[in-house]
Amino acid sequence: RPEAALGHLREAVRIREDPLDLVNLGAVAGKLGRYAEAERSLERALALDPGQLRATLVLVDVLALQGRRNEAAQLAVKAARATRALHAELPERLGLGAALVDQGRPDVGVEVLEETVRLHPGSPDALSSLSAALWHAGDARRAEEMASLALEEGDRSGAPLLVVAAAR
C-alpha cells in the first residue's frame, strides 16, 4: 500500500506544505525508488524548516540508495555539526549516529553519540549505539565498556552482547 500512501501524501502536500508531510512524502517516494521526487520533497521540507533533522536523515538515505555515498556522507557530517546547536530528540540523534557509521564516518558518529549519552545518561539505546560506533571506529576496548553499560541499563536488543563477544 505504499503507492496509496504516496497518493495521500501528495494530496496533503498539495493542500498545505507541511514540513512533516513533505518528509513523509520523501521517505515513501525514496522507498519506492522515486528518487527525484524524494529529493525535491525533502529539500522543500528543509527549506521550510532548516532544523528538520529527520528530513536530513531521510535525504542521506535517499542519496546513499542512489550510490551517491560521498554526498550522503558530507550531508550526514554537516547534520552532525548542526545537531550540536539543536535540541534534537533521542531517536534523531541515534539515527544520525547510525547514518554517519553507515556512510563511513564512524569517527563523527562517535562524537554525536558521545554527546547523546551525555544528554541521555542511562539510555540503553544510546549506550548500545555508541558501542557499535566505537566498534566501527576501531576502539574495541571502549566499545566493550559501552556495551557492558548498555546491558547494565537494561538493553534487550542483543547488540551489546555481540560487541562483548567480538571483543573477547
Image (cartoon, rainbow, N blue to C red):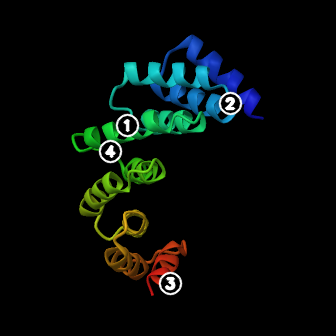
- Please tell me which of labels 3 and 2 falls first in the chain: 2
Residue position for label 4:
88
- Label 3 Cα neighbours within 10 Å, binned few <14 / some 14-19 / many ≥20: few
Secondary structure at badge 2 equals loop
Amino acid bearing label 4: Ala
User: Is 161 situated left or right of 105 in this image?
Assistant: right
Secondary structure at badge 4 equals loop
- Label 1 Cα neighbours within 10 Å, binned few <14 / some 14-19 / many ≥20: some
- Seen at 78% across and 35% down, the residue is 1
Asked if the residue at tag 4 contacts the one at tag 2, i.e. Cβ–Cβ closer than 8 Å, the answer is no
In this rendering, the answer to whether 161 lies above or below 40 is below
Image-quadrant location for residue 52: top left
The percent coordinates of residue 134 (x first, y second) are 36, 66
Residue position for label 2:
33
- Please tell me which of labels 3 and 4 falls first in the chain: 4
Q: CA distance from mark 1 to mark 2?
A: 22 Å
Asked if the residue at tag 3 contacts the one at tag 1, i.e. Cβ–Cβ closer than 8 Å, the answer is no
Residue at the left extreme? 85
Q: Nearer the viewer, residue 46 or 17?
A: 46
- Please tell me which of labels 2 and 4 falls first in the chain: 2
- Label 4 Cα neighbours within 10 Å, binned few <14 / some 14-19 / many ≥20: some
Residue position for label 1:
74
- Please tell me which of labels 1 and 3 falls first in the chain: 1
Residue position for label 3:
165
Q: CA distance from mark 3 to mark 4?
A: 32 Å
Secondary structure at badge 1 equals helix
